[in-house]
Amino acid sequence: MQIHKTFTTNLPIAPTSTYGGQQYEIRVHIEQEPRTGNWWLVVNGGIAVGYWPKELFVNLREGGTRVSWGGEGFSGKTKVCPPLGSGHMPDGRYDHAAFFRQIYYTTGSDTNHTPMAVFEHVDKSRVYGLKNDKYIDKEGFGYSFTYGGPGGTCD
């Protein structure tokens, strides 16, 4: 259920980053409200966009055992996957591809944890890529990776 009028899941987020140029970020996290058990989408450090009722996630009543970050492109019947991120393969530069940084998860004790056991998955048709930098010891980066690609024929 969406509750915020400015941030909406139906419209593109603007402004957008440019390849090799100005970069814009949005901070996103999902949290479970202890009182109701509902799952909230929160952006930019405190803007509650909306929530998913706990009844949609019967297997997450007591939290989860796995978390995922990344992007997906779907081909449908055409077997042509769309560009993902900037439309370029990750090359190690954070102004060339889509990225996640400061990745962590929180336990019931409200303690932030850096991912340790990481499973990387990239589409077998190689129209997308992933460069996992793991932990970058630079202020503001933490656990980070870049991803994306031009799209193309995929299975």
Image (spheres, rainbow, N blue to C red):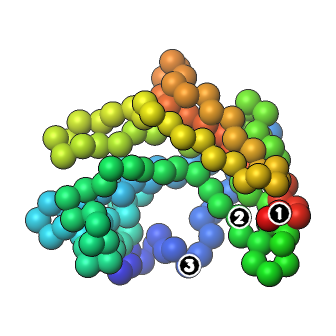
The residue pinned by badge 2 equals 73
Q: Is residue 56 left or right of residue 78?
A: left
Q: Is residue 140 visible?
A: no
> Looking at numbered disc 2 in the image, what kind of residue is underneath it?
Gly
> Looking at numbered disc 3 in the image, what kind of residue is underneath it?
Asn
Q: Residues within 10 Å of mark 1 (few under 14, many from 20)?
A: some
Location of residue 63 in the rendering, given as x and y in whole percent from the top left corner = 25, 56
Instruction: Single out the residue that lies furthest toward the right.
Output: 153
Indicate which disc residue 27 carries.
Answer: none
Location of residue 13 in the rendering, given as x and y in whole percent from the top left corner = 60, 65
- Vertical arrangement, residue 155 with respect to residue 116, above or below: below
Q: Secondary structure at mark 3?
A: loop
Viewer-nearest of labels 2 and 3? 2
Residue drawn at point x = 71 percent, y = 70 percent: 74
Q: CA distance from mark 1 to mark 2?
A: 10 Å
Q: Residues within 10 Å of mark 3 (few under 14, many from 20)?
A: few
Q: CA distance from mark 2 to mark 3?
A: 17 Å
The residue pinned by badge 1 equals 154
Location of residue 1 in the rendering, given as x and y in whole percent from the top left corner = 35, 81
Q: Secondary structure at mark 2?
A: loop
Viewer-nearest of labels 3 and 1? 1
Dot 2 or dot 3: first in sequence order is 3
- Vertical arrangement, residue 27 with respect to residue 115, above or below: below
Q: Is residue 135 left or right of residue 67?
A: right
Viewer-nearest of labels 1 and 2? 1
The residue pinned by badge 3 equals 10
Relative to the observer, which residue lies in front, 123 or 128? 123
Residue drawn at point x = 46 percent, y = 39 percent: 103
State if disc 2 and disc 1 touch (CB < 8 Å): yes
